[in-house]
Image (cartoon, rainbow, N blue to C red):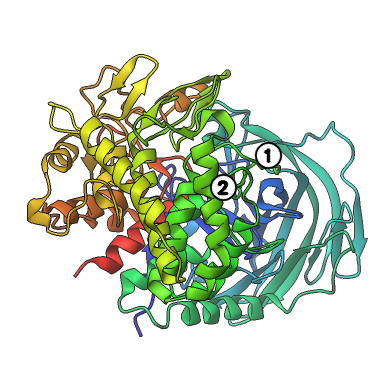
């Protein structure tokens, strides 16, 4: 049974800033909460913490336990601080990272080891699956007896904000073995002594780089303490409650760690190789228990659930990982949100919104892939009327100008101030890539969806003649309208300013989708020119760029403040998830893609350890940006890897 790849880093990385601070780890609780930080131990984001909980939904996460700072007291009486913090003054103090001998992420569990002469101390962190609960184990591995003190730095705030010492007092109630904070979460461990000192000006360098407020204040609520001999542990548990109050305490932290490792082995038991096992374990982080069954977190640390991302990632997250039963529940729950032919997009606002033109079409694709993969005709029969309603609503016209043009049967869309495709960045109310009109990806998805729905109808014994007619007309119009003399497809036709012939990766769906309008039964019969154009201009080691570098609108770095980043978001930034459409399109037209995943598989150990980032700079060296852990990026890399010989 292949095990997931273990990511091991030595002092050259761990003990060096910024190298150790640029590599992040995450462990999740299966509910949308997580623990997250850096290899060096430095908190570089406002989102970092050992207990970040999702009380009602991932969109409402709150940071609770920010840090547990170990302090070694040697037999000589010398105290050595092993934590690492950066402050608004520019100081890095203490500098415990300089004493790290190694960091390892194995079976999804992060482990640090510090060496101080002949003393070796180890820390492991894991979350209890299905519960907002973290266990932290400190173990003395070697050396003479020591006394270990662990200081608890706490807050209770929205994950997107910060808390100040001058704000309303943080309510803290000591208990026999720890402390309760804000009646919301509890810490438990040995030898607890209460404190109450605010540490002012904790600095998060990644927030500064993103143009956001980088400072906050943390309350040291107290410390845990134990004398340790080699082999002995100091274990700390932290867990959050609910509207019904704090539950009974979790199992000891060492049991939580052991359970996390055992669960990782179970999740990857059927993997055929180490890469598949690693990606399956990464995929698990995004599948969470929602109010109506399984749901998908789009990315850590700041995204919640997005239906577009969920449906795009569906094959990789559920079918490629053997989790079709959970996927079935998810598809049924999402089908219940259909309104006026549109799938709900429960985004980071925490509200149910209908604001995408493509999520519903990806939903049609996901249902088709599920039924095709599993033979689940019962699901097809259950959902067929709702899916028929999607077509009816699009023919009639629905929100934001989303409708089928009766002249050519193609899908058009657009409304002032809206960006309705996956290229959805909006700055000060102005869409950066509005793509009003007939977008190439939407119409590829529309043609694909009509064919998929016709197949589902036939599977359930229904006639599909009307859908076949709609499909044939839309496909013929697509073939007539989108190809250009430049050798690739227009990104949008019939836009406000005419046709947009920008070279983007969106066109790849026309070839790569199972029933894409330019897909042929024989790869030799397909037109390889658009895929070759994408290969030459868009393909990078981490996936395709969103715009060709020779386009006047190209932006090669996805950096700066929110406005700068949003302006660059879809104007050249690399999107790893697009490796899926690229691989599908290349296979459809017979373009060879040797070593296609080499860069992305190497990337698993470069930034968000064991996972794939949301985005990367368009310019070399294609440094990763956005969320370090992104669902559709992992899903598409896994799907492509599983499909290759």
Which residue lies at the image location 64% right of the left edge and 42% below the top edge? Answer: 348
Q: Tell me the residue that label 2 is attached to.
A: 306
In the picture as drawn, the residue positioned furthest to the top comes out as: 497
Residue 320 visible, this angle: no
Q: Is residue 71 above or below residue 426?
A: below
Q: Nearer the viewer, residue 194 or 285?
A: 285
Q: Position of residue 202 (x, y in %)?
A: 66, 37
Q: Position of residue 639 (x, y in %)?
A: 34, 63
Q: Tell me the residue that label 1 is attached to.
A: 349
Q: Position of residue 380 (x, y in %)?
A: 50, 68
Which residue lies at the image location 21% right of the left edge and 51% below the top edge? Answer: 519
State yes or no: discs 1 and 2 in contact (Cβ < 8 Å): no
Please identify the quadrant where the N terminus is shown: bottom left
Q: Secondary structure at mark 1?
A: loop
Mark 2 closeness class: few <14, some 14–19, many ≥20 residues within 10 Å: some
Q: Secondary structure at mark 2?
A: loop
Q: Nearer the viewer, residue 323 or 175?
A: 323
Q: Is residue 486 above or below residue 458?
A: above
Please identify the quadrant where the C terminus is shown: bottom left
Q: Position of residue 484 (x, y in %)?
A: 17, 28
Residue 569 visible, this angle: yes
Which residue lies at the image location 67% right of the left edge and 46% below the top edge? Answer: 59
Residue 159 is left or right of residue 490, and the answer is: right
Q: Nearer the viewer, residue 287 or 1?
A: 287
Mark 1 closeness class: few <14, some 14–19, many ≥20 residues within 10 Å: few
In the picture as drawn, the residue positioned furthest to the left comes out as: 524
Residue 549 is left or right of residue 158, and the answer is: left
């Amino acid at each position: 049974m292949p095990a997931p790849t273990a990511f091991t880093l030595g002092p050259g990385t761990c003990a060096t800033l910024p190298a150790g601070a640029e590599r992040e780890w995450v462990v999740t609780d299966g509910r949308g909460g997580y623990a997250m930080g850096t290899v060096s131990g430095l908190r570089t984001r406002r989102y970092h913490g050992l207990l970040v909980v999702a009380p009602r939904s991932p969109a409402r996460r709150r940071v609770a336990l920010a840090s547990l700072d170990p302090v070694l007291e040697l037999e000589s009486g010398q105290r050595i601080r092993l934590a690492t913090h950066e402050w608004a003054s520019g100081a890095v103090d203490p500098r415990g990272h300089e004493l790290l001998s190694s960091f390892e992420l194995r079976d999804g569990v992060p482990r640090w080891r510090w060496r101080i002469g002949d003393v070796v101390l180890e820390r492991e962190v894991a979350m209890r699956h299905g519960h907002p609960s973290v266990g932290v184990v400190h173990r003395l591995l070697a050396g003479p007896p020591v006394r270990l003190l662990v200081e608890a730095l706490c807050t209770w705030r929205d994950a997107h904000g910060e808390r100040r010492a001058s704000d309303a007092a943080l309510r803290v109630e000591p208990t026999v073995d720890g402390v309760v904070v804000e009646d919301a979460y509890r810490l438990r461990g040995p030898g607890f002594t209460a404190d109450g000192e605010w540490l002012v000006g904790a600095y998060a360098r990644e927030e500064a780089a993103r143009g956001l407020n980088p400072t906050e204040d943390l309350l040291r609520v107290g410390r845990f303490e134990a004398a340790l001999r080699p082999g002995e542990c100091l274990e700390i548990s932290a867990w959050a409650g609910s509207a019904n109050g704090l539950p009974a305490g979790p199992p000891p932290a060492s049991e939580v760690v052991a359970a996390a490792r055992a669960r990782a082995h179970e999740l990857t038991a059927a993997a055929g190789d180490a890469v598949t096992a690693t990606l399956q374990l990464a995929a698990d982080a995004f599948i969470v228990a929602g109010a109506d069954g399984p749901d998908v977190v789009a990315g850590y640390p700041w995204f919640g659930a997005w239906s577009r991302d969920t449906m795009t990632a569906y094959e990789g997250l559920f079918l490629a990982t053997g989790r079709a039963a959970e996927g079935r529940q998810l598809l049924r729950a999402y089908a219940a949100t259909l309104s006026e032919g549109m799938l709900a997009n429960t985004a980071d606002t925490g509200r149910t919104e209908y604001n995408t033109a493509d999520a519903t079409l990806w939903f049609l694709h996901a249902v088709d892939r599920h039924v095709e993969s599993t033979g689940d005709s019962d699901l097809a029969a259950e959902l067929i009327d709702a899916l028929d309603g999607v077509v009816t609503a699009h023919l009639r016209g629905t929100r934001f100008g989303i409708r089928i043009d009766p002249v050519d049967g193609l899908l058009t869309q657009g409304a002032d101030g809206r960006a309705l495709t996956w290229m959805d960045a909006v700055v000060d109310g102005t869409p950066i890539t509005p793509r009003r009109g007939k977008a190439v990806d939407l119409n590829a998805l529309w043609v694909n969806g009509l064919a998929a729905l016709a197949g589902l109808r036939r599977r359930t014994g229904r006639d599909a003649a009307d859908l076949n007619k709609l499909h044939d007309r839309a496909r013929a119009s697509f073939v007539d309208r989108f190809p250009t003399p430049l050798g690739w497809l227009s990104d949008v036709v019939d836009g406000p300013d005419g046709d947009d012939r920008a070279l983007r990766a969106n066109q790849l769906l026309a070839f790569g989708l199972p029933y894409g309008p330019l897909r042929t039964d024989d790869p030799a019969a397909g037109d390889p020119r658009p895929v070759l154009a994408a290969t030459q201009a868009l393909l990078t080691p981490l996936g395709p760029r969103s715009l060709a570098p020779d386009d006047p609108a190209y932006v090669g770095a996805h950096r700066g403040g929110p406005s700068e980043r949003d302006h660059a978001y879809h104007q050249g930034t690399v999107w790893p998830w697009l490796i899926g459409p690229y691989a599908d399109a290349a296979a459809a037209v017979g373009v060879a893609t040797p070593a296609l995943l080499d860069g992305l598989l190497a990337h698993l150990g470069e930034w968000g350890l064991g996972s794939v980032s949301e985005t990367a700079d368009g310019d070399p060296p294609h440094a990763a940006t956005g969320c370090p852990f992104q669902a559709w990026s992992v899903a598409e890399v896994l799907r492509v890897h599983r499909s290759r010989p």
